[in-house]
């Protein structure tokens, strides 16, 4: 007989989700509604400094909100500490992360470590960290998913997101399609290791896979407002992680493969592209319908071979062999010992990832 899990647990979720055209103009209203204060630290990258960041500054100033912009260089712990130093000097009331994964992850970490709230303003729909409680930060030798807090608000302007390079949006779809193997890994660990699962977070995560699959034609068409579908799914994936209290519903063996590639590959590809490629191979190991996943990827314009992704065959094999060591505490289809060289070559060859 199954026992009922009855334990105390915090579930922190974003308070406001603002998604639609011209949402950028609503930032002062969001700040006022949430009583965040009148002084902001805006973290962004150099590419956006004279572009969208300038618009955000003007909008905030028009809303009688003082803003100081700081440019991040990378997504490392050293960068987090550097921006915490800026935070101590500026003494803002709240933090804003503007951009792709790196600025939002750094803003998320700075806000968490300084016990403040932050607003997430994604400019590309390439990852599911826009509203999650996890931050992907590079350590001394590899990338880690570390604890943080979810943003108090997400402001996603579809006009900006629609104009971003389609490759980034496709990568976001790839990150979402990869949830299929992440869920399979979690369920496997539940069966073999008795790891606790969250049915609700699994349902949320699975819903994002189904949404991208169902709406693939609309996404591929890039019709006006198409990015709304992808961002909505990315936010749902983020919420799944918030509910779970970990990245389990969104990150499994396919993400470990991607993180291994980040360390091994001479020129790593986009996170979502690598995770999607990994999900084909991990789907094969799980005996899932990996061919359907591959076909959806092809339809969306995602690379399905190492060559198309600019990766060397030997880099893919090495990543497959070492992926299990990225998060040894997390049980996946790769087991504790990982794949042998022969097994790695077989899975990559059978799925067509390498020739």
Image (cartoon, rainbow, N blue to C red):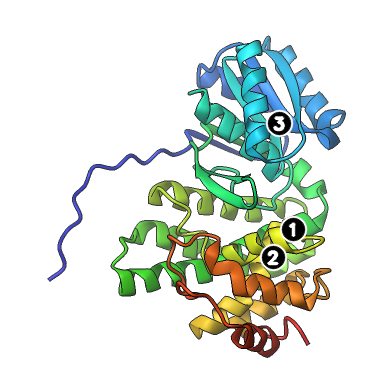
Q: Nearer the viewer, residue 299 or 325?
A: 325
Q: Residue at 54% x, 61% y: name it.
A: 208
Residue 6, image x, y percentages: 18, 50
Which of the two labelled residues, at mark 3 and mark 2, occupies the earlier sequence position?
A: 3
Q: Residue furthest right?
A: 50
Query: Which quadrant does the N terminus fall into?
Result: bottom left
For label 1, the residue is: 270
Please give the residue where the numbered disc 3 appears in the rendered image.
24
Where 255 falls versus 6 (above or below)?
below
**Mark 3 residue element:** helix
Q: Residue at image x 62%, y 74%? A: 320
Residue sitting at 63 percent across and 32 percent down? 80
Left or right of 242? Residue 180 is right
The reply to whether callout 2 and callout 1 are in contact (CB within 8 Å) is yes
Q: Which residue is mark 2?
A: 274
Q: From the viewer's perspective, is residue 214 above or below residue 167? A: below
Q: Nearer the viewer, mark 3 or mark 2?
A: 2
Q: CA distance from mark 3 to mark 1?
A: 26 Å
Q: How many marks?
A: 3
Q: Nearer the viewer, residue 35 or 280?
A: 280
| CA distance separating discs 2 and 1 | 6 Å
The mark found on residue 86 in the picture is none
- Element marked by disc 1: loop
């Amino acid at each position: 007989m199954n026992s009922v899990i009855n334990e105390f647990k915090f579930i922190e979720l974003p308070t406001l989700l603002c998604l639609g055209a011209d949402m950028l103009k609503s930032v002062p209203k969001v700040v006022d509604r949430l009583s965040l204060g009148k002084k902001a630290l805006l973290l962004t990258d150099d590419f956006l400094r004279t572009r969208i960041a300038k618009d955000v500054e003007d909008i905030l100033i028009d809303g009688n909100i003082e803003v100081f912009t700081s440019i991040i260089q990378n997504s490392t712990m050293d960068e987090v500490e550097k921006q915490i130093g800026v935070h101590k000097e500026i003494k803002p009331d709240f933090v804003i992360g503007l951009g792709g994964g790196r600025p939002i992850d750094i803003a998320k970490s700075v806000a968490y470590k300084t016990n403040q709230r932050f607003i997430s303003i994604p400019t590309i729909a390439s990852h599911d960290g826009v509203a999650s409680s996890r931050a992907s930060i590079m350590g001394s030798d590899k990338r880690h998913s570390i604890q943080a807090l979810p943003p108090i608000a997400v402001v996603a302007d579809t006009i900006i997101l629609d104009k971003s390079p389609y490759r980034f949006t496709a990568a976001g779809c790839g990150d979402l399609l990869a949830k299929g193997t992440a869920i399979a890994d979690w369920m496997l660990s539940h069966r073999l290791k008795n790891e606790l699962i969250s049915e609700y977070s699994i349902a949320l995560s699975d819903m994002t896979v189904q949404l991208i699959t169902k709406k693939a034609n609309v996404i591929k068409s890039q019709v006006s407002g198409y990015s709304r579908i992808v961002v909505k799914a990315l936010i749902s994936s983020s919420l799944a992680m918030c509910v779970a209290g970990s990245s389990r519903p969104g990150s499994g063996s396919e993400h470990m493969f991607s993180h291994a590639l980040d360390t091994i590959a001479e020129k790593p590809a986009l996170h979502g592209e690598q995770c999607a490629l990994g999900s084909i191979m991990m789907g094969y190991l799980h005996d899932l319908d990996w061919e359907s996943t591959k076909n959806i990827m092809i339809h969306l314009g995602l690379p399905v071979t190492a060559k198309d992704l600019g990766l060397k065959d030997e880099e893919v094999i090495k990543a497959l062999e070492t992926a299990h060591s990225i998060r040894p505490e997390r049980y996946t289809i790769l087991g504790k010992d990982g794949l042998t060289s022969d097994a790695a070559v077989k899975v990559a060859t059978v799925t067509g990832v390498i020739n």
